[in-house]
Image (cartoon, helix red, strand yellow):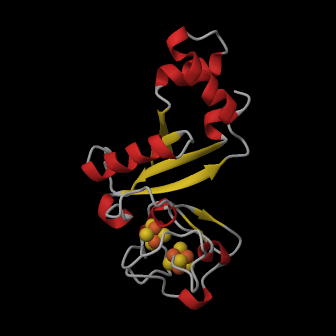
Amino acid sequence: MTPDAPPPDLVPDRDCGGCVECCRVLQINDEEIRKPAGKLCPESSGAGCGIYDRRPGVCRGWFCGWRKLGYLPDDARPDRSGVIVNTNREDGARNCFERHYVIVRGTRAGEDFQSPAAQAVITALTRRSGLPVWLGYEDSKTLVHPREEIAHLVLNGNPPPDHLSQEIADWRQRLGPA
Ligand code: SF4
Ligand code: SF4
């Protein structure tokens, strides 16, 4: 979904090229356009947007993490890496890990996130994003950062063991109330 004039926060020298993964993988529920997850948008030519000059506003303003985050590997374009990254905010979040987070979605059926490209993306996000990281495919998602032990301690309010107390405190400070 490349815009006519890329906003200044995009990574220089990265473009969508022939990638159309966001037009296929993501669900869009907007008054101008609706499509289910996992189905290529009917407006796509397969190599780009077929209505590029009059594409909906939601498409004009949307870019995946690979276009926005310079610390993701250059070769992790979603059509090559098999994963697409974006940040989400959920009004109806069940807990602090769902309020504002990064999600790495598999673009291929059965994606197990074990490929070197997927692992490089996940590692970069866990080190650099500062946000919870989820892995997702279609309607399901699994929290992978922080790991389960840390997430449990952040949520349950019990005093953590000494060796984890700083890590727990850091997450609580960043994410707010559990
Ligand atoms: S997934 Fe990213 S690289 Fe691919 S078309 Fe969408 S914005 Fe461009
Ligand atoms: S309208 Fe164009 S940019 Fe928007 S999802 Fe469909 S193909 Fe992609």
The image shows residue 153, relative to residue 142, as above or below, that is above
> Furthest-bottom residue in view?
53
Q: Is residue 138 visible?
A: no
Give the x, y percent position of residue 92: 72, 41
Residue 33: where, in percent of width, then height?
A: 63, 73
Please state if 111 lies on the left or on the right of 135 as rendered: left
User: In front: 59, or 67?
Assistant: 67
Residue 168, percent across and down?
59, 22
Corner quadrant of residue 154: top right
Q: Quadrant of residue 9?
A: bottom right
Q: How many circles with numbers are drawn on the protein? A: 0
> Is residue 128 positioned above or below 50 on the image?
above
Q: Quadrant of the C terminus?
A: top right
- 167 over 49 or under it: above or below: above
Q: Nearer the viewer, residue 62 or 168?
A: 168
**Residue 136 x, y percent position in the rendering:** 45, 46
- Ligand 1 image-quadrant field: bottom left
Question: Which residue is found at the position 67% from the left and 41% from the top?
Answer: 99
Residue 8 occupies which quadrant of the picture?
bottom right
Residue 30 vs 49, above or below: the answer is: above
Q: Is residue 121 visible?
A: yes
Residue in the picture at 57% in, 53% down: 87
Q: Nearer the viewer, residue 52 or 44?
A: 52
Which residue is pictured at 48% across the width and 87% down the height?
Answer: 50
In the image, what residue occupies the spot 32% across and 45% down?
119
